[in-house]
Amino acid sequence: MQARGPALPQSAAIDTDLLRLVGSTALQQKLDTIVGPKTLILTPRLAGPLGLVTEVGLLKNNHAVTKMYWLEPGALSQTERNVVYLCRPEVRWMQQIRADPQPNQHNYHLLVVPRMTALCTTILSDLGVLGSLEIQEFQLGLIPLEKDVLSLEYEDVWRKIELDGDNAAIFDLAKAIMTIQRAFGPIPRLIGKGDSSRRLVDLLKRLRREQPASTPSSAPLANGTIDSMVVIDRQVDVVSALCTQLTYEGLVDEVVGIKHSHVDVDPNLLNPAPAASTSTPSQASFGTLPPRKRKHLLTATTDPLFAELRDKNFAVVGTILNRTARRLNEDYEKRHQAKTAAELRQFVGQLGGLQNEHQALRLHTSLTEQIMALTGTDEFNVALEVQQNLVAGVGLATQENSIRDLINQEAPVKTVLRLLSLYSIVSGGIKPKVLEEFKRDILQAYGFDHLPLLISLERLNLLTRPPPSSRSTPKPPFVLSRKPLRLIVDDVDEQNPQDPSYVFSGYAPLSVRLVQCALAGGMGGAGSKIGAAIPGVGAGATGGMAGVAMGPAGLNGWKGVEEVVKALPGATIDEWQKIDDGPKRLAPGELPTTIVCFLGGITFAEVSALRLLNRQMPSRNLLVVTTDTVTGGSLLTSLMPEHTRNPVLPSA
């Protein structure tokens, strides 16, 4: 097995582990201000992000955390004198906070991530516990999911920004990027697209102006140079998020679910039961429940096989697993060839590594089988064919009948709505009569509990009616960008991909194409070639981006693609930040880094596409920064009322 290392060259990339250290140190310092043994009561959804920056053993051994509970009724039954609540500033968690009627027995502390709000203060006051709490704010900041991916790990950011008008996540991301600028120096160039991108850039400028004079803005604390940032608003490209991801990591997220870099798996895959067992299958399973799922950290740092698989198109995953299995079998067979004591010692020394690889192979084989159980169904393949036809603009009217068939077959409602939303975006709206028929069919087939979801999709312009037809009516933005940005690629090499379109087997994510244009080059007018930015376009294009000059001053911005970018929704940004001492100079052998920031979430397929670009750039590193990781299903789930998110399925 030839494991592929992290996407960023370790000798040249900025050290993202520094941010993990910042988050861990901040939490430890907050806990150390509370003297004596303490009970930590935290929310389950905050445990995942915290687990990526610190360890439970460290808190217990070095910071006097003796007990830990989930924040729920009854959590105060057995606690130390110091009770520490740790949660997000959300109403549901504030309502769970209780204070002992005998305050002399306990000291109560509330750590709010990242900051307290007026609404939460009002709720605590109404509950009568505000006066008993010592409240502190805890900035967790960006969390490294991988060497090249940083995330706030917030939930439902897209819905909160676009539907609720809550821009708190934009402010928190701006604060986190300010931490990056404090560590590595100011970011000279800011390129972006979308209204939320505009808000983020404006906040960054304001926060820099408001920095205390005693904090030099251009005095970096760590090695590494970030010379630019490209910000993409999720609302600019909802199509890529709604499409079914076809990379391995993307499909694991779609089918199994990846939350805070963890997947829920059968514990036998991690700690297999003894092979020899005297019980019969009926004895072993009679009267017992299936084993509870265990959370497993899925990261390329600890799993070389995952490092090789994660960015592959799923079509080639089986070949890699088979090759790995054969190699491991050959390595195990070498024990029979060991004839001397030295050879036996050498084999025993390799045994631990072989066992770890064998466990990884067993895990990924199981995940692959779960994915294949879905991808092998007629329902999945019909939906995928409709999706591919929609983004390519092929037979749009014909796809209506296919979507109706899926509704009649009671395909998952999120599958239907993803396709219907794609249809609406690509075609510029759905005819009023047809849209009403679809809405009626969905409510009758899946229940009227989904009416709020349909209303939310309309408010977000994902299910809309077309504007009045006239000669001056412009084409939908996605259609206008499809040909100039070469979003559809016919010849895709899934084995050795040279173009980002491999992540969707023929569709190149619009968001990634925009990043390509911003970094490498644009087009010079309608119908002209895009050049090095889009491989394979125009006369003389050879594919790939190898050899493209990408120095600090070589970024293209939106030059040459102004009209295409202007047609997409939201503001267009290409600005420079004033730096008092001038840009930071590159050390010998150092490569500049560009932050690619996604506001509203990024899919793992888009991350894989950006890693491909990074491998094709000999003179630049890319660092992905996002509010969270999403799928089309998770975006729709965030719009659903709570009681419809996890419906009870009828028993077989």
Image (tube, helix red, strand yellow):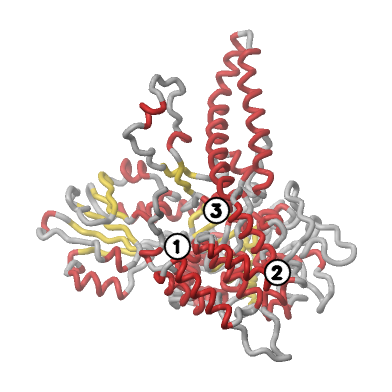
Helix, strand or loop at mark 3: loop
The reply to whether dot 1 and dot 2 touch (C-beta < 8 Å) is: no
| Left or right relative to 29: residue 451 | right
Marks 1 and 2, the one that precedes in the sequence: 1
Residue 321 x, y percent position in the rendering? 64, 37
Observer able to see residue 214: no
Task: Residue at 53%, 64% (x, y): give it.
Answer: 408
Give the residue type that dot 3 points to.
Thr
Task: Residue at 32%, 43% (x, y): give it.
Answer: 62
Quadrant of residue 227 within the rendered picture: bottom right
Of badges 2 and 3, the one in the foreground is 2
Helix, strand or loop at mark 1: loop
Mark linked to residue 16: 3
How many labels, in total? 3
Residue 400 x, y percent position in the rendering? 62, 70
How much space separates mark 1 and mark 3, taking CA atoms? 19 Å
Mark 3 neighbour class, 10 Å CA radius: few under 14, some 14 to 19, many 20 or more: some
Identify whether 347 is placed above or below 568.
above
Give the residue type that dot 1 points to.
Tyr
The N terminus sits in image quarter: top right
The residue under label 2 is 518
Task: Residue at 43%, 70% (x, y): give it.
Answer: 450
